[in-house]
Image (cartoon, helix red, strand yellow):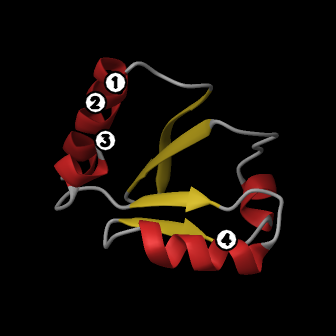
Amino acid sequence: MANDYVDDVTFLAIAGHGDLGATREEAARLFSDNLMWGLDDSIWDLYGIPGQPASILIANGVVVDGWFGALDPAELRQKLDNLVSLAS
């Protein structure tokens, strides 16, 4: 879904609590210009994330939405569309 928002949204996947060296190698292989890795475990604490999956949406430096757990694709797309409208 990230490819559908390539001009509007930057996605940041936070590395899990594991070997950051292996994560860096995998990230270099998998991720694109608008889908990047955050390789700093302190990001979890910064946003109060106890585990995965969790999502935080930020527009213009302000947290505008967040949830724990997976969403169905239609609901996720609705939240991303709302994020894009808030950021413009």
N-terminal of the two: label 1 or label 3? 1
Q: Position of residue 75 (x, y in %)?
A: 35, 19
Q: Earlier in the sequence, mark 4 or mark 3?
A: 4
Q: Rounded to the nearest whole Å, what is the CA distance between mark 4 and mark 1?
A: 26 Å
Dot 1 and dot 2 residues touching (CB under 8 Å): yes
Kindly report which numbered mark, 4 or 1, lies closer to the viewer in this rendering: 4
Q: Is residue 39 visible?
A: no
Q: Which numbered tag is attached to residue 23?
A: 4
The answer to whether residue 15 is seen in the rendering is yes
Distance between the Cα atoms at labels 1 and 3?
A: 15 Å
Residue in the picture at 46% in, 74% down? 29
Q: Which mark is residue 73?
A: 1
Q: CA distance from mark 1 to mark 2?
A: 6 Å
* Residue picked out by circle 3: 83
Residue found at x 55% / y 68%: 37
Mark 2: amino acid: Arg
Q: Earlier in the sequence, mark 4 or mark 2?
A: 4
Residue for point 32% across, 66% down: 34
User: Is disc 2 placed on a helix, strand or loop?
Assistant: helix
Mark 4 / mark 1, whichever is N-terminal: 4
